[in-house]
Amino acid sequence: MIRRPSICVGEQSFSQAALLLDSEAFQIAKKNLLEVLLQASAKLQGIRSGDSVGSEAKAAYHEAIAGLQADKGRELYFPFLSSGLGRGPFVELIDGSVKYDMITGIGVNFFGHSHPELMSEMIDALPADVMQGNLQPGHEQQELLRAILTRVGPGARLEHGWLLCSGTMANEFALKIIRQKKFPATKVLAFRDCFAGRSTAMQEITDNPKYREGQPVYGEALYLPFHDEVQGLEESVGATVAAMREAATRYPGKIAALMIELVQGEGGFKAAPREYYVRVFDEARRLGLAIWVDEVQTFGRTGELFAYQKFGLHEYVDVVTVGKLLQACAVLYARDFNPRAGLIAGTFSGSSVALRTGRRIVEMLTEDGYLGEDGRIERLARRFRENLRRSAEGRCRGLIGDIRAVGGMMAFQPLGGTMEEVKAVLMRLFDLGVIAFYCGHGPYLVRLLPPCGALSEAQLDDVCGLIETALVDVGEKGK
Ligand SMILES: Cc1ncc(COP(=O)(O)O)c(C=O)c1O
């Protein structure tokens, strides 16, 4: 489908760029280009093993991988170099082999590969400059911000936003905005096992000492226990609230914010019941803390556009950060958090292609049946749980521990959940034609962030069948 370009003011085209996109010549050229792109994509019918690609392709592939590894100065996690082309959940590697992409660059390609709607947006971005920024905003910036801000939901107080190029920088801006508002308080209450990025400030908030080896720690992050399923609601709330009060007593007037991933990403796809968040957020309010929700990984994935919508927490959120599947990143904030001029800015807000496709992604997510209890995301989550449970009671008895699926955030614990076992399963899966990754802090889990916008239930069944095979193979080997 060719959509009317959004470069117009109302229904009218005033600029040469708008007239160009509207012109018959452009529309015909675009149609032809899309046709050849989709013809190439359609050739990628399913998994194609690396063993079947011929020795020349294999050798060239290994050379390219070795070159990238040499330049980066370290090994890649997988021998994976994509050609950029794909078809739905399938991605082509540069040797011509094809795999199921079940991690999508840690949740970036929610609509899979070579999606016709997104390709169409990419072509429409051609008249624009490559990059946009603070002093060079194009209409794509305005449209993307508007698309997000008009969907924050009833009762949410998020009125403004700023676009930038990484989730880490979105979090940096969130922290600066909060610190300015809460001056002179600077400290952040974060949760054990959280991940916030790898800048100097975010590596400190991130609860993983391995990610800040050799780096100074300024004592700005204080950690709270997260909800614990085994302990249950009352004990979990009690433990978290007690830790908040202790921190507030120890550092009076020094704590600026409570920062939370409502579904912990790196931490292992853990979520809490609504009641837990409500009681913890009420306490944060009593202590005068800003509530900052990091939705860099959860945005668009949990079955609602924002995870705070899934848990009905709209009115609590002062600042939220988003990224990944949006193709762009943003910090959104309530009116009273709007920072004074000079605090946040930057050369780049994103590429025109990214900003444009981001807006289309938000539209597709909210208008095409993905959200809600019976939306496509929840249906895939149920299917994943059913498949994994069946395997755990059948061929994979004793090989599967915890099974977690919060919308399109799916994970399971293979075998004993050691890092070695998880890595062995991931490598076997890669050989079988499935790319996945890990999460958790011990026990570790296999993590899937599938392209829910391009994955059928039959394809998910197929992937689960391959997971079964990988588990059995690794289990056999370990005997
Ligand atoms: C919850 C969360 N916050 C922040 C980040 C950092 O985002 P980026 O890698 O885009 O800087 C990530 C990335 O995985 C994340 O999962």
Image: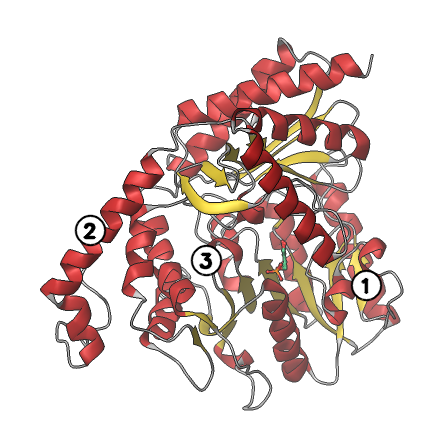
**Nearer to the camera, 431 or 404:** 431
Question: What amino acid does circle 2 point to?
Answer: Asn
Question: What amino acid does circle 3 point to?
Answer: Leu
Q: Position of residue 134 (x, y in %)?
A: 47, 83
- The answer to whether the residue bearing label 2 lies less than 8 angstroms from the nearest atom of ligand 1 is no
Question: What amino acid does circle 1 point to?
Answer: Leu
Q: Position of residue 135 (x, y in %)?
A: 45, 87
Q: Is there any visible trace of residue 270 in the rendered image?
A: no
Q: Is there any visible trace of residue 207 in the rendered image?
A: yes
Q: Quadrant of residue 172?
A: bottom right
Badge 1 density bin: few <14, some 14–19, many ≥20, Cα 10 Å: some
Q: Secondary structure at mark 1?
A: strand
- The answer to whether the residue bearing label 3 lies less than 8 angstroms from the nearest atom of ligand 1 is no
Q: Quadrant of residue 114?
A: top left
Quarter of the image where the C terminus is located: top right
Tags 3 and 1 in contact by the CB under 8 Å rule?
A: no
Label 1 sits on residue: 222
Label located before the other in sequence (3 or 2):
2
Residue drawn at x 49%, y 51% as measured from the top left? 312
As measured in the structure, the alpha-carbon distance from the residue carrying label 3 to the one carrying label 2 is 27 Å
The residue sitting at the left extreme is: 24
Tags 2 and 1 in contact by the CB under 8 Å rule?
A: no
**Would you say 43 lies left or right of 17 here?**
right
Residue drawn at x 35%, y 33% as measured from the top left? 43
Label 2 sits on residue: 32
**Nearer to the camera, 152 or 3:** 3
Tags 3 and 2 in contact by the CB under 8 Å rule?
A: no
**Would you say 111 lies left or right of 197 here?**
left
As measured in the structure, the alpha-carbon distance from the residue carrying label 3 to the one carrying label 1 is 30 Å
Label 3 sits on residue: 326
